[in-house]
Structure formats: structure tokens, C-alpha cells
Amino acid sequence: MIEHAEDPEQFIQEMARVLKRENTLLLTVPWSARRHYIPHDYHRFTRERLGILLDQSGFDEIQITERGSDIGAIANKLTVLTLRLLHPEKPFDWIWTLPLSLVCLPLASRFLVAAHCADALGKGGEEDPLGYFVSGRQA
């Protein structure tokens, strides 16, 4: 959610201010995700930047876990593309979107299955996750 804050440092500091001492902040952020809630989608954060933001705001016991892997990110992109192709903006666009969607649909389906299997087995690269789950305790 902090990708929607114009000033994420101030936003995290305010969360630290209002959170009771020794309580835990929980948040998720996207990494490999399409822009959303446009025009208020301002940032993407690495795990390193998230750690710095929480540390500088006085949190400790910071844990950052990847949500999904590179396989899930590919599955997500293929799914979004397939859905977009199946709902063209102009009726005439069906001429090119339908054949391409027929190629993408089985591929996206297979990648979705592969992503769930990879997550269950702890496989896939963590360098390009779908996002991060972050927790930190208010010191």
C-alpha cells in the first residue's frame, strides 16, 4: 500500500507514531505488478529499501518475505495480457487479439499452475517476486 503514498518515508514514520509500542506493523507491497489505482501509484520498493524505511522509522525485528517468485511474476504478466487480449478496446481489434489470446491462454494457464507448484516447493527465483510481505515491531 505504500506505493500509493507520495512520501513513503513520512507515511511509515506516521504509522510508527500511531502504532502502540511493541505492536507489529504488517504490510504488503507489489514489486512485479502492473500500475494500479492510477494516477496514484508512485513507487516500487526493493527488500533493501523496505528494510531501510522501517529501520529509520524505529521498527525492529523487521522481516521481509518475498510473495511469489519469477515464475509467479511471469504467470501474472501472461494472465493480465491474456485478459486484455480477450477484451479489446475496439471491436475491430479482435482480428489480431483473438489469435494471440489463443496462444497466450494455454501458456498463461500452464504458468499459473507452475507458479503455484513453485511456491509450494520453494522453487523459483526470489529476485523478481510479485511483491513483499513486511513486518516490523514498534520499538
Image: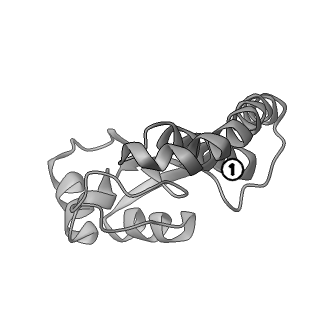
Say what amino acid the circle numbered 1 marks: Ile
Residue 92 located left or right of residue 113? left
Crowding at label 1, few (<14), some or many (≥20) Cα neighbours within 10 Å?
some
Residue at 21% in and 62% down: 39
81 or 14, which is in the foreground?
81
Write down the quadrant of residue 8 in the picture.
bottom left
Q: What element carries label 1?
A: helix
130 or 24, which is in the foreground?
130
Is residue 40 shown above or below 95?
below
What residue sits right under mark 1 in the picture?
A: 74
Residue at 75% in and 34% down: 119
In this view of the protein, can residue 65 be seen by the observer? no
Residue at 51% in and 37% down: 86
Is residue 99 shown above or below 117?
below
Residue at 55% in and 63% down: 47
111 or 106, which is in the foreground?
106
